Amino acid sequence: MNDRVTVDIRDGVADVRLVRADKMNALDDAMFAALIETGERLKGEAGVRAVVLSGEGRAFCAGLDMGSFQAMASGGAARNRDASASLMTPKRTEGGSNRAQHACMVWREIPVPVIAAVHGVAFGGGFQLALGADLRFVAPDVKLAVLEIKWGLIPDMAGMVLMRGLVRDDVARELTYSGRIFGGEEAVAIGLATRVCADPRAEALALAAEIAGRNPHAIRAGKRLLNLMGDGDQHALLLEESREQGALIGSVNQVEAVMANLQKRAAVYVD
C-alpha cells in the first residue's frame, strides 16, 4: 500500500498522501486498493479525529490511469461490455458502492471530517475522489473537470451522489456533458470547493488540528447528521437531531467542553 498511499497520524490528525507522483497520482488497480484499504482502516482507527487527503508531486489526482483507457480501446467491444458488467455484479458495500465507487465513498463514510487539499489537477476519478471529502481546499491555479465524456464515458465513481446537493442540477449537467476544465474560484462559486488557498495542504492541516481539539463525539455526531441531510426526510432528521443531542448532553466530553470554557483553558477530551 505504501507505494500508492501513506498515512501519518499525529495529535489526532491523519495525514493521508497519494504518493504515485511520477504518474500524477493516477488511479490504477493498486491505487484503488490502497484508497479503500486506507479508508477502511481509518474508519476504526483509535484516536483519529480528522483526516487530510492530498497528493504528492504536481497533482492531487489526474484520474484514471492512461493504461486503462488504452486497454478499453484495444480490448474490443465484447471485452469492454464484460468489464462494464463486472462493475455491476460484484458484491457491493452496505452503502451500495462497487469497488471503484467505494474508493471515493469510503471517505464520506469515515466517521470524522475529511478535508481534501487539492492542487495541480483533479480530473475525472480524481475529481470524484475529492468530492468524497467533507471539505475541499483548492489552490488558486488548480484545474478540475468532470472529464469522463472526453473518453466517451460518464462519471461512475459516485460522482452523481457526491455532486448532488453541492451544485444546481443544470450546473452538474453542463459539467458532465461538456467535460470542460474549470478553476478554483469557479469551483467555490458553484459549490464544488470550500475555499481557495495559497497552500491548501497547510490550511487543511491547520483546520484538521483545530477540529481535533473539539469534542470528538460532537464532531462525529455532526457528521452523521450532515450525511443524513442529503436524503433524510424532515421527520427523520428532526428525530436524529434530538437523539444525538440527548446523547451528548451531560456526557464526559460535553461537560469537559463547558468546564474548559468557564476555566479559560484548553479542553482535554477522551476518544
Image: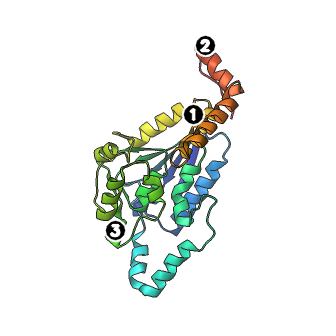
Point out residue 203 in the picture as x, y percentages from the top left corner.
42, 37
Q: Residues within 10 Å of mark 3 (few under 14, many from 20)?
A: some
Q: Is residue 12 visible?
A: no
Q: Amino acid at mark 3?
A: Ile
Res. 149 mark? 3
Q: Amino acid at mark 1?
A: Ala
In the rendered structure, the answer to whether residue 33 lies left or right of residue 76 reads: right
Point out residue 43 in the picture as x, y percentages from the top left corner.
63, 49
Q: Quadrant of the N terminus?
A: bottom right
Residue position for label 2: 262
Camera-nearest residue between 169 and 91: 169
Spatial CA distance of label 1 from label 2 is: 20 Å
Point out residue 143 in the picture as x, y percentages from the top left corner.
31, 54
Q: Is residue 126 visible?
A: yes
Q: Amino acid at mark 2?
A: Leu
Point out residue 186 in the picture as x, y percentages from the top left corner.
29, 46
Q: Nearer the viewer, mark 1 or mark 2?
A: 2
User: Which comes before the other along the chain, label 1 or label 2?
Assistant: 1
In the rendered structure, the answer to whether residue 190 lies left or right of residue 36 reads: left
Q: Residue at x 47, y 82 (%)?
A: 81
Camera-nearest residue between 165 and 136: 165
Res. 212 mark? 1
Disc 1 on helix, strand or loop?
helix
User: Which comes before the other along the chain, label 3 or label 1?
Assistant: 3
Camera-nearest residue between 249 and 71: 249
In the rendered structure, the answer to whether residue 179 lies left or right of residue 260 reads: left
Disc 3 on helix, strand or loop?
helix
